[in-house]
Image (tube, rainbow, N blue to C red):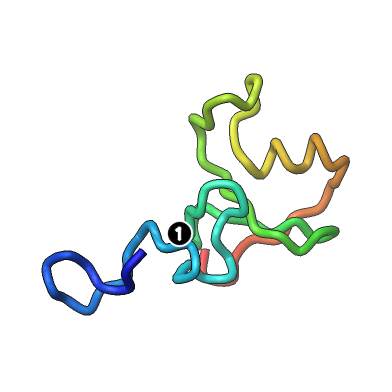
Amino acid sequence: ASSASDDGGDHPDPYDETALPDFACRYCGVHDPATVARCVETRRWFCNGSGVKGGGGVGSHLVHHLVRGRCSQVQLHPDS
């Protein structure tokens, strides 16, 4: 993917995974500080949004990770 948008501007491509910040969700790439949290045990970031499809009733990627990985501690983003 290109690092510039199609309109000739100097904006990063939102679909370019290499341009995502370190705190982007490991599953979907969401990177709004208000909607992500980090697993303390794995130090990976996950979104806490609702409406995740295909999760078997799990409401967020964070909850999915905590249940599947048997982890229990999270840390919010400092800017949230």
Q: Quadrant of residue 62?
A: top right
Residue at 88% x, 40% y is 70
The picture places residue 20, in percent across and down from the top left corner, at 48, 67
Outermost residue toward the front in this view: 1
Q: In this view, does 34 lie above or below 79?
A: above
Q: Three-letter amino acid code at disc 1?
A: Asp
Outermost residue toward the bottom in this view: 10
The picture places residue 59, in percent across and down from the top left corner, at 60, 30
What is the secondary structure assignment of the residue under circle 1?
Answer: loop
Badge 1 is on which residue? 32
**Closer to us: 29 or 8:** 8
Residue at 45% x, 71% y is 19
Q: In this view, does 75 lie to the left or right of 3?
A: right
The picture places residue 79, in percent across and down from the top left corner, at 52, 70
Q: Quadrant of residue 55?
A: top right
Q: In this view, does 63 lie to the left or right of 27?
A: right
Q: Split into 4 quadrants, where in the image is the N terminus?
A: bottom left
The picture places residue 35, in percent across and down from the top left corner, at 51, 52
Outermost residue toward the top in this view: 56
Residue at 48% x, 53% y is 30
**Closer to us: 77 or 68:** 68
Q: In this view, does 26 lie to the left or right of 31?
A: right
**Closer to us: 2 or 42:** 2
Q: Residues within 10 Å of mark 1 (few under 14, many from 20)?
A: some
Q: In this view, does 37 lie above or below 58?
A: below
Q: Is residue 21 above or below residue 75?
A: below
Q: How many labels does the image show?
A: 1
Residue at 58% x, 70% y is 22
Q: Is residue 8 left or right of residue 16?
A: left
